[in-house]
Image: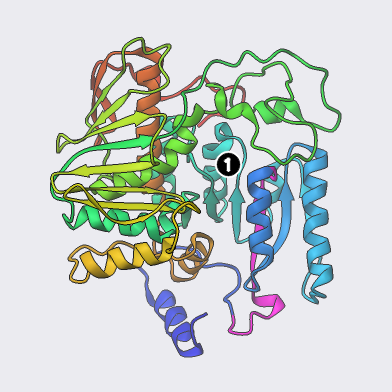
Amino acid sequence: MPNASSRRHFVKAAAASVAAPFILPSRVWSAETAPNSRLNLGFIGVGKMNSGHLGNFLGRKEVQVVAVCDVDTNRRENAKKTVEERYGKDKDAGFKGCEAYNDFRDLLARKDIDAVVIATPDHWHAYIAIAAVNAGKDVYCEKPLTHNIHEAVTLIKTVRGSKQILQTGSQQRSSKEFRIACELVRNGVIGKIQRVETQFGSPAKPNANPEEPMEPGLDWDRWCGPGPLAPYSSVLSPRGVHNHFPAWRMTREYGGGMITDWGAHHIDIAQWGLGEDLHGPVEIIAPEKHDEATQGAKLIYASGIPLTHVNSGFGVSFSGENGEVHVNRGKFKLVMGGKVVHEFIGKETKGTSLDREVLMAERTFLADAKVKLYNSPNHHQDWLNCIQSREKPICDVAIGASTVISCHLMNQAYYHGGTHKWNPETREYISGGDPKWLTREYRGEWKV
């Protein structure tokens, strides 16, 4: 945490800046993180993903979890119990209880909540994030940031208009192996880039899950929300507390398949390495037999560099005139002139470690690097730091939106085939695409 002098300087500077009409958190943190000075957090959607986030933030003294929300009674009560048991175990004198809500709007209406962590199914991300920003909350929202391109554009406008802080949950940006891989590419270590491959699974299919008896304690209508009111299926919303990632991701109505799941991670890193993370492709090419294909779609950038989707490989692979950089979680490989110079691909790599190989590559090839990328050693802490400083986090809304737009464009190639020309500045199809693909039909009051 900053020292007292730097905190006073920050508060004075914020108060004096009439040109920056943003809202600071309701409490300014103290060095001792006293109970009444912590940032109050609310968690919306407390399934598998947010359970992990919840455990992390419960261990941080500078924040306090005061509310959880889920449309499933069992999940929200389990999250409430987790919070209360943790603070009870810690004998936290400042903790006054954790409320559990079915409707996220009740949580957002609380003036004492400073920020929210959103990890609902994808089709809810944009609507809830926009509502949170409009309620004056800072936001950590899971990737993929939105369900469609229209939502991504709208969310950027909303965040920029409010000056709130939004961190997209693309946590690979806060892992050193990915940052160093991108710095190697950006500094020309492997020469002019010729092609990029990103590895992840298949696009989504229309929902075809058979109807099951309704689960007691689940608000199914609210779960479906902006999407169609489908027959209840435990494949989409597993019964009660569960420890797996549900397959709603593989339905077009509620997710985007592996293209927006793992693709949102790996395309993000690919665009970071290419310096395209605030732009995106100019052309999208579908594979042959697009409606049957599980790989082969291409994104073409203004530089002419193609990014190809493959379903086997290394996560992200950059190929240049002089070498190759391959990176995935816990894996790193640098090839120069056809020779492997640094490599760690798991336990089978003996006598070294990921940290060592990445560090040696950095020392050898980036000692005098002209391009140094944003260095965030921890994705959650980066968000908290930026809530205090009011600076953009490592995966700001515009970056998260650019990545998910690229994912959506790739999905549309699989869904419809053909070649589509795209303007990444106006975010419109130039040719080959249909404006209807940019959005969806929204149900009831849940319109973005």
Give the side of residue 214 with respect to residue 314, left or right. right
Task: Give 110 or 165, whichever is nearer the viewer.
Answer: 165
Callout 1 amino acid: Ile
Counting from the top left corner in percent of width and height, residue 121 is at 60, 35
**Can I make out residue 45 in this image?**
no
Q: Is residue 38 magenta?
A: yes
- The span shown in magenta is 30-47
Check the image and report above or below for 70 versus 384: above
**Can I make out residue 280 in this image?**
yes
| Residue that lies at the very extreme toward the right in this rendered image | 216
Counting from the top left corner in percent of width and height, residue 185 is at 23, 52
Q: Residue at x 17, y 65 (%)?
A: 370
What is the crowding at mark 1: few (fewer than 14 residues within 10 Å), some, or many (at least 20)?
Answer: many
Task: Give 302 or 176, whichever is nearer the viewer.
Answer: 176
Check the image and report above or below for 37 versus 423: below
Q: Residue at x 19, y 36 (%)?
A: 305
- Residue 283: name its quadrant: top left
Q: Is residue 137 magenta?
A: no
Check the image and report above or below for 308 versus 97: above
Q: Residue at x 19, y 66 (%)?
A: 369
Q: Is mark 1 on a helix, strand or loop?
A: helix
> Badge 1 is on which residue?
128
| Residue that lies at the very extreme toward the front in this rendered image | 350
Counting from the top left corner in percent of width and height, residue 430 is at 21, 22
- Residue 200: name its quadrant: top left
Task: Give 244 or 437, whichever is nearer the viewer.
Answer: 244
